[in-house]
Structure formats: C-alpha cells, structure tokens
Image (tube, rainbow, N blue to C red):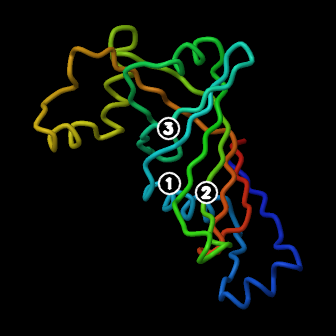
Amino acid sequence: MSKINQQPVPAMLQPIFKHLGIKIKKYRSAAAFEKDLEKFLKRNHVLHLSTCRNNMPRCTPIEYRLHGLTFYLLSEGGGKFRNLKENRKIAFSIAEPYNSDEDFFNSKGVQAWGTARVYNSKESPKKFQEALKKMNIMKALKRTGQKQLPADFNYRIIEIIPDRIKYSNKTEGVYKVTWQRR
C-alpha cells in the first residue's frame, strides 16, 4: 500500500495560478494520484538514471518501459552496470520539454528514488524473458525487421522499483505531490 504527501500551493502563487486558469487537484487517495502519474510516465520514454560508485555519481539518459510503477531499461553496457554492482540504490528524473519563455510555470517532471536489479539472459534467463515480455520488446523489434535481440551484445535489463516519486505538473493540476511505497 502506498501513501502520498501533497504540498499546499503557497499563497503567493495562488493568484498567478488563478490568472493562468490552473486549478490544482487535491488527491483523496494514493490510487487517484497514481492514475495521473502513470499518464505522465506512459507518454514519456526517457529517464536520466543516476548511479554512484566510489563517491563518483554517473547520470545516463536511457529509454524505459513501464509495467505498473516498475521501470524496465534494456542496455548492453556502460559504467552504470559497474556502479549497480556495488550500489543498487538509484535516483532518476523524467522531464517533458516546454518553453520557459512562453510559460514559466509549465515545468512537468518526476524525481524518483529506489532500488535497481539487473538481469541478463545467462544468469537469470527466466527473469530476463519475463522482463522482456513486460517491456513488449518483440513489438519494437518487429518494427526494425528483427525477430530477436542481436546476439552480439550482452543485453541486460535494469528493473527499478521506486520507493519514492515526486511529481509536479502544474498545468495539469499536479503541485508537488510525493508518492511513497510503504
């Protein structure tokens, strides 16, 4: 069961939002919030994954697929895997583009914190195949004329189960809501 914490809109911002026609939602439950959060997550596809090893952070933009509120990332390599071997705690962000010259208050984005697990086809073939199914990878491969992942790469899947997600999207009525897994 999850819970949410919704920050109130500061008094100084209320007249600005009213002038712009922005009505901030007040969520009665975590489930109601999760519906809006999932809409945002499904219409985006790139997150910026932060990992850390030896006190040296690394941030990697990478495509994700969503299954519920679990994120799946397919990758063939990079320093993120060395980092995840040492430290499975991660953070990531997702943001939608907007023109701040036209609409200063239109920022839309997610910050998240959680734990990652890494699967590959050799060490965890069942989990790897299950994750590929959840990611609906075959549909994407068919569009490129492929029937399977190229064998030349050591593909791995990073599964991220977030512990906490902070979402703000003022133009759609979401003001600084933090979701937390219990």
Where residue 98 sits in the image (x, y, percent)?
A: 54, 66
Which residue is at 61% across, 27% downward? 58
Q: Badge 1 is on which residue? A: 41
Q: Badge 2 is on which residue? A: 109
Marks 1 and 2: CB-CB under 8 Å? no
| Residue extending furthest toward the top | 123
Which label sits in the foreground, 1 or 2? 2
Where residue 134 sits in the image (x, y, percent)?
A: 36, 38
Spatial CA distance of label 3 from label 2 is 15 Å
Which residue is at 19% across, 37% downward? 141
Q: Badge 3 is on which residue? A: 61
Where residue 136 sits in the image (x, y, percent)?
A: 29, 41
Within the image, what quadrant is residue 43 found in?
bottom left
Residue type at tag 1: Leu
Spatial CA distance of label 1 from label 3 is 15 Å
Figure check: 79 above or below 46: above
| Residue extending furthest toward the right | 11
Determine whether the residue tagged by mark 1 lies in a helix, strand or loop.
Answer: helix
Q: Is residue 32 left or right of residue 75?
A: right
Q: Is residue 92 left or right of residue 18?
A: left
Residue type at tag 2: Gly
Which residue is at 74% across, 62% downward? 176
